[in-house]
């Protein structure tokens, strides 16, 4: 790894670079923009982190395995609506039902991909529309209120000054994902499946099981995220929770996820989410128009694409050379 772009492409190193960028943004904001970096500011940042973090984590795992789960936005909406509707019998029960629906949705989509041999984008696009449609049917396209305000208070009350229950759950999921990918056989099998599915099968990896498992986790995380946010807002809406997809994709790319599969890490994705949360919170404090938020996000993605371009080209060249050698040896 001699080039800077190759170094940044390494997920853990990228995470460190992004965290340094976060520190730089805080310093610049404090010195030049007069933004006070206190517990309230950090709490706001971590609330934004929690809003898209779990969706980005689930999406990132599917990217790591070489697929792309567009349905996370629909499951995010459906999970929130189901949790609020069913949560009248208890918030824990509402969360459990939402997560189970997320798992079921992910498994069904993965099985369709495996059995029919269809592309994940096509299947999950159908899932996105289906889950969103079900949410509209359940709510009659209206906002649904959750009357237990104590749950919203519990979700949003500061813990240690800067955390909330939502942000702590999100951080715990990222740490669990990092341990899974780095230190377990399942994690290594997921990376192997994303890097080269045929070679993984030859090595004895059950790629079908990996695919089903990852999509089940992706659905569960998206549903859990929607449920937690809806409880925090004391309401759910099939339209009011629809702005999570683009930030989640941006966070995965910023965090080192490669659309070709086999590259990425939950800690890198967490860093990407944190950068977006800080940038958006900072721009909001400065009174910048929301439309400018998207411009800044797009500029960040362009910078990452430029830095990753040579590394991606080198990986594609190595893959082409490997295929050529295998064909020549037959």
Image (tube, rainbow, N blue to C red):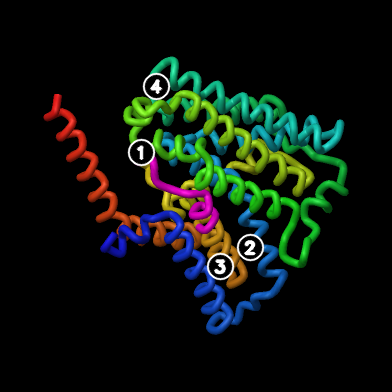
Judge depth for marks 3 and 1 and give the one in front.
1
* Disc 2/disc 4 C-alpha distance (Å): 39 Å
User: What is the secondary structure assignment of the residue under circle 1?
Assistant: helix
Image spot of residue 301 (x, y percent) = 40, 56
Compare marks 3 and 2 and give the one earlier in the sequence.
Answer: 2
Is 256 rendered above or below residue 17? Answer: above
Tag of residue 79:
none
Question: What residue is drawn where x is 57% and y is 43%?
Answer: 55
Q: Residues within 10 Å of mark 1 (few under 14, many from 20)?
A: some
Q: CA distance from mark 3 to mark 2?
A: 11 Å
**Mark 4 sits on what residue?**
118
Mark 4: few/some/many CA within 10 Å (<14, 14-19, 20+): few
The structure residue drawn at horizontal position 60% and vertical position 64%, both measured from the top left corner, is 281
Residue 250: x and y, percent?
46, 51
User: Which marked residue is nearer to the observer: mark 4 or mark 1?
Assistant: 1
Q: What range of the chain is rendered magenta?
A: 260-271
* Residue 208 within the segment the image draws in magenta: no
Instruction: Identify the element where label 3 is drawn.
Output: helix
Name the residue tied to disc 3.
283
Tell me which residue sits at (63%, 30%) in the image: 102
Q: CA distance from mark 4 to mark 1?
A: 19 Å
Q: Is residue 253 visible?
A: yes
- Disc 2, disc 4: CB below 8 Å? no
User: Could you give the CA–CA distance between mark 3 and mark 1, rounded to whole angstroms?
Assistant: 37 Å
Give whichever of 228, 258 is nearer the camera: 258
Q: Earlier in the sequence, mark 2 or mark 4?
A: 2
Q: In the rendered structure, are the residues bearing label 4 and label 1 in contact, judged by CB atoms less than 8 Å apart?
A: no
| Residue at which label 1 appears | 195
């Amino acid at each position: 790894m001699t080039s800077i772009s190759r170094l940044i492409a390494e997920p853990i190193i990228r995470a460190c670079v992004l965290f340094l960028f976060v520190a730089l943004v805080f310093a610049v904001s404090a010195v030049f923009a007069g933004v006070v970096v206190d517990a309230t500011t950090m709490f706001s940042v971590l609330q934004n982190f929690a809003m898209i973090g779990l969706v980005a984590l689930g999406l990132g795992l599917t990217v790591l395995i070489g697929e792309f789960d567009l349905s996370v936005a629909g499951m995010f909406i459906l999970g929130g609506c189901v949790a609020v509707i069913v949560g009248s019998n208890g918030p824990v029960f509402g969360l459990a039902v939402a997560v189970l629906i997320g798992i079921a949705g992910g498994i069904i989509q993965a099985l369709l991909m495996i059995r029919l041999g269809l592309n994940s984008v096509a299947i999950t696009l159908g899932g996105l529309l289906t889950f969103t449609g079900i949410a509209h049917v359940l709510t009659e396209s209206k906002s649904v209120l959750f009357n237990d305000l104590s749950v919203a208070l519990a979700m949003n009350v500061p813990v240690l000054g800067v955390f909330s229950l939502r942000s702590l759950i999100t951080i715990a999921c990222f740490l669990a994902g990092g341990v899974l990918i780095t230190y377990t056989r399942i994690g290594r099998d997921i990376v192997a499946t994303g890097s080269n599915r045929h070679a993984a099968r030859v090595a004895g990896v059950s790629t079908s099981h990996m695919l089903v498992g990852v999509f089940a986790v992706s659905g569960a995380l998206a549903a859990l995220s929607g449920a937690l946010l809806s409880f925090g807002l004391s309401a759910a809406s099939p339209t009011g929770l629809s702005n999570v997809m683009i930030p989640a994709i941006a966070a995965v790319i910023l965090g080192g996820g490669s659309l070709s599969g086999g590259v990425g890490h939950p800690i890198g994705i967490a860093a990407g989410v944190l950068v977006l949360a800080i940038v958006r919170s900072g721009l909001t404090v400065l009174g910048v128009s929301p439309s400018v938020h998207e411009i800044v996000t797009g500029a960040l993605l362009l910078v990452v694409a430029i830095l990753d371009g040579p590394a991606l080209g080198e990986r594609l060249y190595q893959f082409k050379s490997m295929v050529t050698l295998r064909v020549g040896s037959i």
